[in-house]
Image (spheres, rainbow, N blue to C red):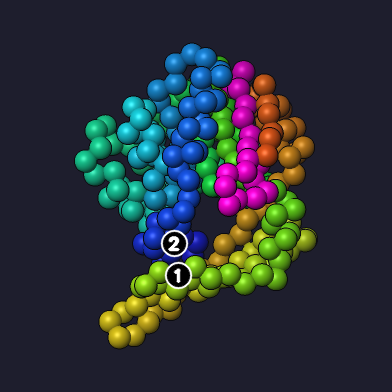
Amino acid sequence: MNCYGPLAGWYDRLTGDVPYARFADLYEAEFARAGGEFRLLLDLCCGTGTLSCEMTRRGYELIGVDASEEMLMEAREKAAGLSPAPLYLCQEAAGLDLYGTVDAAYCSLEGINYLPPEELDQVFRRLRLFIRPGGLLLFDLRSPAFLRSMDGGTFVDETEDVLCLWRGDFDEEACCLIYGMDIFTRQGGLWRRDSEEHLEYAHEPERLRRLLEGHGFTDLRITPLCFEGDTERLFVSALRG
């Protein structure tokens, strides 16, 4: 089953409570702490581009990268009218290929959890290549404990025109949360059903630290990130040496 295919057109309606402005504030605080100029940013796993647009409106230049063509279609439509509009590229994170370096890269809303453990080393290698010396890498992720706590759970998100049901199953051998998702959308007097399967991998903080330090990232901080109504999210900040 495809990931972020049928869901793409409904993603924003089902995630209206995401505090994008608070993520933007957090990133700007990190820029101020690091010092220097931060103007050109990479939004890795940018999804429908809401945060890319928020950062653009704050005066930054954005490159958004995502592996889902459907999510990028939503992002490009959302960015219409912005000047300069974010540049969106359809790429896998492990195959990241930019035209030059950026001042900082961020990956929000546990995009890192979607990367298999065997790809992390290559992803961090590519990020080091495309972040300028003295630049920042910022990302958040769900803790392994949180992902395991979702095992066996059934959850519902809905609006007037869409109903999304998903069920979590934690696979200890693969160390990932597998959740099958059924999306019911109103089609006149009928409802259409689509299905997706998502995998979120449990990455141990100490392994992240070893990988990042192995690729020359310094001033590494891994701290809890608890926005209101959210739990068990970690925030990682690292300086590109």
Pick the residue in front: 46 or 153. 153
| Residue 71 picture quarter | bottom left
Front one among 37 and 129: 37
Residue tagged 2: 14
Q: Position of residue 121 (x, y in %)?
A: 66, 38
The extreme top residue here reads: 36
The residue sitting at 33% across, 53% down in the picture is: 73
Residue at x-position 35% and y-position 40%: 53
Which of the labelled discs sits on residue 182, or is there none?
none
Q: Residue at left 46%, top 53%?
A: 17
Q: Magenta span covers which residues? A: 225-241
- Residue 100 shows up from this direction: no
228 inside magenta stretch: yes
Q: Mark 1 vs mark 2: which is more N-terminal?
A: 2
- 66 vs 208, left or right, is left
Residue 180 position in % (x across, y down): 58, 70
Q: Which residue is mark 1?
A: 158
User: Looking at the picture, which amino acid does disc 1 mark?
Assistant: Glu
Q: Are marks 1 and 2 in contact (CB under 8 Å)?
A: yes
Indicate the amino acid at tag 2: Leu
